[in-house]
Amino acid sequence: MTHEFVAVAREGRVATVMFDRGNRFNSLSLQAIEELTAVALSFSDDLEISAIVLRTPDGSGFSAGRDLSDPAMERRRSQPMLAWRHLAGAGKRLCAAWEGLEQFTIAAVERFAIGGGLALAAALDLRVMGKGAHFRAPEVALGLSMSWGTIPRLVALVGPARTKQILCLGNDRIESADALTWGLAQEIVDDGHAAASALEIASRAAAMPPVPLRMTKSTVNAVAGALAGAAIHMDTEEVMLTELTEDFAEGVSAFRESRPPRFRGT
């Protein structure tokens, strides 16, 4: 299947998935989310590939998160509740599809991974960052709850206190050095070299015997995410609720107008 924003290349037992919105931000429109989900699911029955690198083109960021200008995102709320709920769960399905792969997965993060970009990167097994890259989770700062199943993944990676720091202080950047120290990133490299480093790690993983590699990864995920289902079963509904608040409208307006928001708890 041919996609507009996602392409797959294979070399031996390693696959590279290139996500490219055609700009430096790689925001996650609904179409991009669905394409990335479909590509992840396409590996479910692939017994030839052992490791997968998710990257973006040279010079672009990993992802600036949900595309607030995407008309399809705005149209969700005009749909009947059943359709709105399904569409609102697209990001959750995206991250679940990548997390659920038996192949060893690595995110090559250059420049930034923000909001949904951080959520997607956290769903992969490892994250390699360029030295000048950063993570940020602005959802709370915009009047939203953090969704896409991200909270238990962050807790497993960095612990509860750091997760609260990342999410509740949503305007703060997590620079690469802190990300490495906290456990959010596993390797820091010179800017522009994240993809090459991720491919080198993928090649090492792909050299392992495929059966125990897959079994070990699946077992680690099962242990780390044992309570995740109970924690996130309503996170789509929570973000739908926060999208209805006046604070969310104010947060988005303030972001677009480059001014401080005025939140009122409404």
Image (tube, helix red, strand yellow):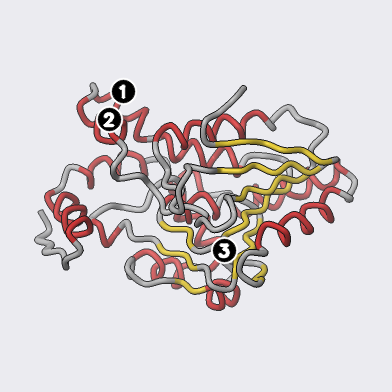
Q: How many marks?
A: 3
Residue at 10% from the left image edge and 53% from the top image edge? 266
Is 219 situated left or right of 57 in this image?
Answer: right
* Distance CA(mark 1)–CA(mark 2): 8 Å
Measure the C-alpha gap from mark 3 to mark 2. 32 Å
Secondary structure of the residue carrying numbered label 3: helix
| Residue 108 disc label | none
Check the picture and name the quadrant holding the N terminus.
top right
| Residue 52 position (above or below residue 121) | above
Tell me where residue 73 sits by quadrant.
Answer: top left
Q: Which residue is mark 2?
A: 76
User: Type of residue at label 2?
Assistant: Arg
The mark closer to the camera, 1 or 2, is: 2
**Do the residues bearing badges 1 and 2 touch, measured as CB atoms within 8 Å?**
yes
Q: Which mark is residue 83?
A: 1
Q: Residues within 10 Å of mark 3 (few under 14, many from 20)?
A: some
**Amino acid beneath label 3:** Leu
Q: What is the quadrant of residue 30 in the picture?
A: top left
